[in-house]
Image (tube, helix red, strand yellow):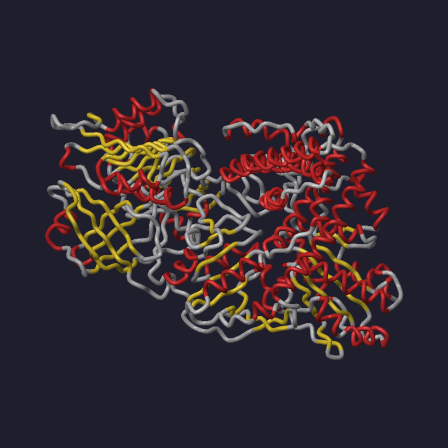
Amino acid sequence: MSYAITLTTHDNQQIDFTCEPDQTVQEAAEEAGFFLPALCKVGSCGSCLGRCTEGDYHLDRYSPSLLPENAREHGDILVCRTHPHSDLHITAPYNAAQIQSAENALRDAEIVSVELIAERTTRLVLQLLPDPEHGIAFEFEPGQFVELEVPELNLKRAYSIANTPNWAGRLEFLIRLQPLGQFSSYLQETAKAGQHIQVSAASGTFGVQEQSLAPRCFVAGGTGLAPFLSILQRMADWGEDHPTQLFVGVNNEQEIFCQDELAALEQAIPQLKVDICVWKPSATWTGFCGTPADALRAYLANADVLPDVFLCGPPLLVEAATHIAVDAGINPERIFCERFA
Amino acid sequence: MFCYQCEQTTRSESGDGCATAKGVCGKDSATADLQDLLVYAIKGIAQYAKRARALGKTDKAADGFILFGLFTTLTNVNFTASRFVSLVMEAAQHRDRVKALYEAAAQEQGITPEILTGAAAWIPATTQAELLIQSKLGAMNKDADTVGEDIVGLRAMMIYGIKGLAAYAHHAHALGYEDEEIYARLETALDFLANDPTDAGELLTGNLEVGAINLKVMELLDAANTGRFGQQEPANARISHVKGKAILVSGHDLQDLYTILEQTKDKGINVYTHGELLPAHAYPKLRSYSHLVGNYGGAWQNQNADFAAFPGAIVMTSNCLIEPAASYRQRIFTAGPVGWQGVRHITDDFTPVIQAALALAGFQEDEPERTLTVGFGHHAVLGVADKVIDAVKSGAIKHFFLIGGCDGAAPGRNYYTDVAEMAPKDTVVMTLGCGKYRFHEHDFGNIGGIPRLLDIGQCNDAYSAIQIASALAGAFECGVNDLPLSLMISWFEQKAVAVLLSLLSLGIRGIHLGPTLPAFLTPSVLAILVEKFDIRANGEPADDLAMALNKAA
């Protein structure tokens, strides 16, 4: 038998479809012509996060860091992993406008450069190739991510876009090199300028809340800086005047990267303050010592107006910073997270 | 939030109007409340501007701001709460400057300046949260309990009409055309409303004055459009696409279209009009740009589908904007009074639009050519007046229907398609505004060489329609009300309110107004309009046609 699924978007639009028990809610929605935001569709990217407010279900296997136990207790689900046991009511964090009516095809891009910019940190620059449907344009919102795919190596990874939307078809990524990571070894050993790579359509709901006039506090762990570079560059281009604080955390000074970009952003956005937080600094380090979560705690203790808080980085940092923000009295609805899977 | 300024406003048994977190148009309550506060602040500018003017002093920047500021509050124009915070602050600065101007002039002339209260004395709060509390000052229904719904409705109709005329005046202003008499009368009307009038008779007079001012405004805009771009001439506008990179320009602003055409010439980009810019193809100076290739899409309410399918950049120069879908959010741009949070706003330099158009794929091939005929402004129609008059005298033309105003999503709007298509073959259908998109591809044929479907232009070309009607009345030595002419007005937003008030100010009777009557027209106010002007709600198309033709017989 099939169950009735009711999905309510962030802007209170409702879509209805039916789902068989052996289907995932994601598959059933697509069958009904609703392409809900999702990338990996195997429970490893977190882009299809929703909350089930009514009904029984079970989830297939997924990456546990995406859905901590307490979040599951509140009904958080990965739509791509959810099978109904009854009719379900699901709320989604995105607006109805983000639901597509057709699946997006992968785009071809050429590698422009792969460059080591700090210890264990690479910057990858891609140039989209023209196609009859899109030209060279690649449309995304600052804060969104894409999946990069190298079909011949059967590799697929999601990364936040580090540059701002542009009409040159240029995409930049900051990628942490993991010792045993497949994509890391691809970047270090195989990837060369001129080679092709495939790019999914942009996805994800992480980004500034455009209607909010509250100050913005961005907390980045390592390459979690990427979406904030995109967001800040747009703030600079559009002259947005929200008071803004950015904390960037690294383990040691050798890992610091993008200093020139951050200095340029501080010039372009007069109300922006950037603090690099070094967890294990040398004796000569004069900046903040500790994690960006520590820096966030100190900042919120002295804040006149509570900001909207945006967190991107390793799950442990995101969890810690979320607790700090909630303890400081920030409404959880004003805390926005992007966790590395 | 309380807003009932447009036709699609929430209707319910407990009372009409959008009063929840989000209006039907997509405007959230913070934006709606800040818009009310902006209108309040603008009344404060007008209070001082009127008095300064009486002492011979005027302030061009303040007058321009009044028009622009009011325009941003029309339906489907600007949805950006943060923009309204700045606009409210700007309004207070303009007011303070005009106040100083007035007080200095008074001192110079040995007069004791008046101490004004209300919006003139309001001090803006410094944060959005406090401004939202202050916004109650501007709420349309703030004293409904004491003055009653009729007074609230009459005030609403008057301010909505003012918003509409301000939008038209802003378009003229953008083309370099201004008129001090219009500013003077507009300031007086706003000053009248700033005092929260409670006399129904005075408010009715005030409403008709708004209609009369709007006639002057539409005349000015006609002069601006034709002065800058030449008299409208009948011409074919292509409505199928051609191969190549593309920009789509929507809204009403001919000046923005002109700027875009100038900035894109020799760039290998084709420019298309959308919605209410279709009549641009009738203006010789705009037509002369060979890369103005055609019109794309239907009326405004279909833009989600039309824009998603358009493979180029899109510019919205005035209403009607609806929430941009994710699929085209990056490639739609706003200009002038328009805004949507997270959508790129352009001020004069359309370079980002051009970059987008060049990056995007554009149309891959030509579509078979299809065209529409546009351009029957008063100049063109009166150019063949003799032929038209002869046709009426010989009985070849029995009746004229003017189907004017906006389109919208409401199912009741099929009424206008039915009226146009059911109108007998010996009648002529004149159109203006975007309501025509429902039926203008239908082949209506012609009567002795005169096309049966004559498109007069944009909604503001109601001025042209009035000119044509007046000329016909002159030729037949009768009043406009005695002509074999029926006016079927489809309204959606505040410009249509201004046009309606203009028609009423001319004493035109028997207008059919639909698809539904405005929520701000209370039963008692409607009864007055029915008595004075014989205003009619839409009935069944066949019955309304029969009634109209009976009048002609």
The quarter of the displayed image where residue B354 is located: bottom left
* Residue A1 in sight here: no
B363 sits left or right of B47 in the view: left
Location of the C terminus of chain B (image quadrant): bottom right
Judge by depth and name the residue closer to the eye, B18 or B332: B332
Question: In the orientation shown, which residue stands out farthest toward the bottom?
Answer: B448
State how many labels appear.
0
The image position of residue B538, as x and y in percent, is 75, 53
The image position of residue B380, as x and y in percent, is 71, 71
Judge by depth and name the residue closer to the eye, B547 or A220: A220
The quarter of the displayed image where residue B430 is located: bottom right
* Residue B319 in sight here: yes
Judge by depth and name the residue closer to the eye, B153 or B519: B153
The image position of residue B371, as x and y in percent, is 58, 73
B385 sits left or right of A166 in the view: right
Question: Which residue occupies 19% across, 61% down?
Answer: A194
Question: Which residue occupies 25% across, 46% down?
Answer: A159
The quarter of the displayed image where residue B452 is located: bottom right
A222 sits left or right of A91 in the view: left
From this view, report whether residue B350 is shown above or below residue B196: below
Location of the N terminus of chain B (image quadrant): top right
Question: Which residue occupies 44% across, 45% down?
Answer: B342
The image position of residue B54, as x and y in percent, is 74, 39
